[in-house]
Amino acid sequence: MDTSAWGRRARAHAAMLTTALDAQAPTFSQVLAERGAQIAITDLLNIPVFVSKSASPGCSVAGSCDLTARTITVVRASSGRMRFTALHELAHLLGDLDGDFQDALASAPQTKRDDEEDACEAFAARLLLPDSAIDPVLAAHGLNARGFIALTEATTASREASAVALAHRMEAPGYVALIDEDLNLRFAARSGDAFPLARGSAQGAGVAGTVREIRGTRGRGQLVYGSGARTDEMYVDARWGTGNLLYVVATVDSPGWEVLQIPRRTPGRANLQEGWCENCREPFFAAHRCANCGELKHQACGRCGCDVTVSTPQRVCRECNFERPAHMFAGGSAACTECT
């Protein structure tokens, strides 16, 4: 699916959630602006919002919701980040009870993206950052790292909300990401059919490692998946900014800054093809396809698209509660590599 179609679909799904919210609480946006997300959600929708000291994996943000108990939990962080997380989780609760939204998700073309997560991110960003707040900043700075930083400084919205809003405006697949001073990924909003980047994943082997000692960089570079594999080489604009964070805008083409665009292959991958392993929940690269099903085989677990069950030792991660291949647990760790 082309990037513009993905963006339109995410925003259309978010609009359905906004309609559902307006029907239940017409003054929600006003209370949100005046008193914050926690009070707006608790007082107007009677949904308890709890604050936790540790993250609950599952969503792309640091929070979770209980669809049965109708509660929201957010991880203690900056007020902006907690506000974005609370609204993201509210979107899950609204969507769970909205038949039109569920029908829209079910009828959407099947892709590698999680349409509900996209909609929830778009919903939160839409409430916190209307177009009237974004347009002047991008007109002055452009859709680049400097524009990313300027947007976070010009509004009260969180950096995460700003990243999502910018990703929805990108013209090609890529990422708008935040990397902390330890070179770990804090958050990444993605555009188009880009594979997800795991929150907390080490980014030192990518572009973040090259800008540790300098103010920023603009050129070619890579980000790093949770598995340790690198993305294809992209156009990257990265700059250290407020919060001692590295602000990154990365795209496969059509960057929001002037460059000489010359397509390149990633070194060492001339004969490799990119695949996605549903068993390990991670991207991988392989040179050959299975003669039986025609799909790429992931060497780490031996799985392809065949219906034959692959005998791979599995363990349940104590953090995300997903069953993962045993090779995703380092040493005697009870948590998988995606959660550690």
Image (cartoon, helix red, strand yellow):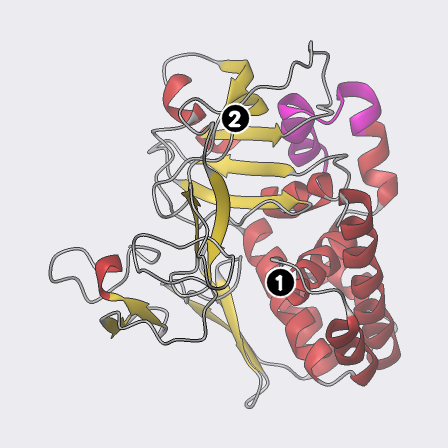
Q: Position of 143 compared to 92: left or right?
A: right
Identity, as a three-letter code, of the amino acid under mark 1: Asp
Task: Tell me if I can see residue 48 in this picture.
Answer: yes
Image quadrant in which you'd find residue 156: top right
Main structural element of the magenta stretch: helix, strand or loop?
Answer: helix
Residue 283: image x %, image y %? Answer: 45, 49
Viewer-closest of 129 and 271: 271
State yes or no: residue 154 in magenta: yes
In the image, farthest residue toward the front:
291
Q: Residue furthest bottom?
A: 68
Residue pointed to by mark 1: 114
Query: Which amino acid type corresponds to the residue marked 2 in the rendered image?
Result: Glu
Q: Is residue 73 visible?
A: no
Tag 2: Cα neighbours inside 10 Å, few (<14), some, or many (≥20)? many
Question: What residue is shown at x 67% (from left), y 38% (from top)?
Answer: 173
Q: Nearer the viewer, mark 1 or mark 2?
A: 2
Lower sequence index among marks 1 and 2: 1
Q: Position of residue 251 (x, y in %)?
A: 64, 30
Q: Position of residue 289 (x, y in %)?
A: 46, 51
Q: Which mark is residue 233?
A: 2
User: Which residue range is magenta in the image?
Assistant: 137-156
Q: Which dot marks residue 187?
A: none
